[in-house]
Image (cartoon, rainbow, N blue to C red):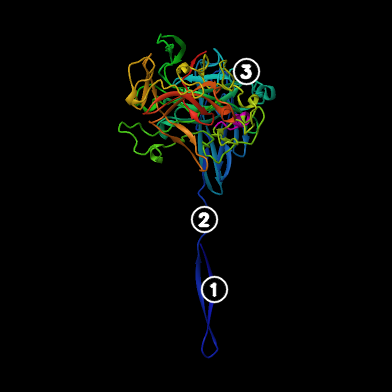
Amino acid sequence: MKIKSIILCALALSGAAACTKVNVTEAPEYVAPLYIQASDSKVVFDVTGGQAMITLASNGTVSCGEVPSGFEVTGEDGAYVIKAGVNASAETLSGELVFTAVRGEESASAKVSLVQRAGEAINLSADGFANCYIAHTHGTYRFSATVKGNGKGDGGSDYIKNYGVNIEGGTRATLIWEARHDGDRSLTYEVIDGTPVYHNGYITFSTGRSEGNALIAIEDIHGEVLWSWHIWVTDTPVTAHDHILPDLEGNPRVVAQIMDRNLGAMNNEPMNLENRGMFYQWGRKDPFLPSRTPYRTNGYPDINEPEDNEINAEIGDGTRPWDVFATNTAPKVSTNPGNIPYSVKYPNKHIEQFSSNSLYTWYVSSVGADKSVTQVKLWDENKTIFDPCPAGYKVPGGKLYANFGNVDENNPRDLTGGKPDEYTEDFHWLWEKFGNCGRVWKPTGDFYPVVGTFVPMRGEDYVYNHYTGELGMYWTTAPNTYKEGESAYFEYEWVRMNEAAAFSGFGAMVYACQIRCVKE
């Protein structure tokens, strides 16, 4: 605290000046308390070892303490690489790193636990490469980080031609985000246990005690994302069964083997918040979170109210927050591979693009009637490197739910569920009436929750989860071939359901909808 003197003078009527000395106390200059914070509190290696990066944020000078036996630490100025070799012992190795921040006579510390398991991690990519891997709680896993997606085709996008299918230049793994559907932060942090590790072309990670979803990426030396993978942590086994679509005479026929729940869901129980899968913009491989708005049995008085459509923006201890605002438009491009490179680099960004007729897309800007650019089969009957389903599964093909032969082919809206006042037991009405915030596919009894969607609101400064508990939309791979003109080029088949009806139609690829995967 400083005290300084000032002299105040006043002019008297006689013309003489009267002066007084006054002591003034100055407020001390604010100095923030010393702090130090680690990017993660735990690193878990499998038996083969590897390396991970820990960053320290501090307003002091940071140093690393004694390194536990079996581990190696290099780096300075708040960025440290932790390495582990092969664990040749039969026991788990463990230790603790202590990072200390010093400023004058003050000091503070941050601790990072190190663990190296004696057993080898389960190889999730052993049975095939994919953009999504299913894991269970309390496990250690690894997958190949050398191949993009399933390592096969890219439709007609020319992405592989320009960027290749192999991942090169990877130096470290990072957790982009982790989350539970209910947005419980205390449990969100326990979907992935510790920092992912990169070693010899593989990413290794451990799961915690909480079911949920996460996104893990491989980065180059500059921290740019080269590719990312959805980790779906669920302890209830994911299974598949017959999906039946009757022919036009009502005869049952099996058209696919379909997953028992939505992609990314923990279950398929009506009214259970965890029956919500992840959201996907058409043709993109990386997911967005469903709203955490509870289901309500008494309906929604105004389904556009923000409190009825609360965005789940949890990121756990990931490094990149969600970017789901309408102002975050992608570059204006009109040639292949469009905005795929941008979407790979920013898997946490909801992307939108406006064509000349105001139809929403994310892939390219308006290109007139050039189908070679607009309909490039990013998702296709043959699984592509952008397909978001786990190994052995894919986004369903067209006409999975629709009998288009019964409707006007120029406007194919197959009302397979019917309106409430038109509902009959006739085979044509394949969806049961709306109930429990969803509909049931009559031929199999499968429940489909109405989870809502991300709707881009043009002219607004945000994108929000819309119609939670009131609207359900499920993608297929089929493009709109029933309509001519540019508006058709960004439309793909979906099944759309609400309280009034359930039908198959077409929606713009910028919408983020649910997926019910089918066997390849």
Tag in front: 3 or 1: 3
* Amino acid type, mark 2: Tyr
Relative to the observer, which residue lies in front, 75 or 432?
432
Instruction: Look at label 1 and name its amino acid.
Output: Ile
Q: Main secondary structure of the magenta part?
A: helix
Residue at horizontal 59%, vertical 19%? 384
Residue 48 pos. (x, y %): 57, 18
Q: Residue furthest right?
A: 162
* Residue 292 covered by magenta stretch: no
Q: Residues within 10 Å of mark 1 (few under 14, many from 20)?
A: few
Return the x and y of residue 204 as percentages of the image width and height. 54, 22
Range of the magenta residues? 340-347
Of 415 and 507, which appears nearest the observer? 415
Q: Secondary structure at mark 3?
A: loop
From the image, tell me which residue sits under label 3. Answer: 153
Q: Is 341 in the magenta?
A: yes
Which mark is drawn over residue 6? Answer: 1
Q: Are marks 3 and 1 in contact (CB under 8 Å)?
A: no
The image shows residue 23, relative to residue 518, as above or below, that is below
Mark toward the start of the polypeptide (3 vs 2):
2
* CA separation in Å, label 3 and label 2: 59 Å
Query: Which element type, helix, strand or loop, lies under badge 1?
Result: strand
| Residue furthest to the bottom | 14
Asked whether 201 or 447 is in front, the reply is 447
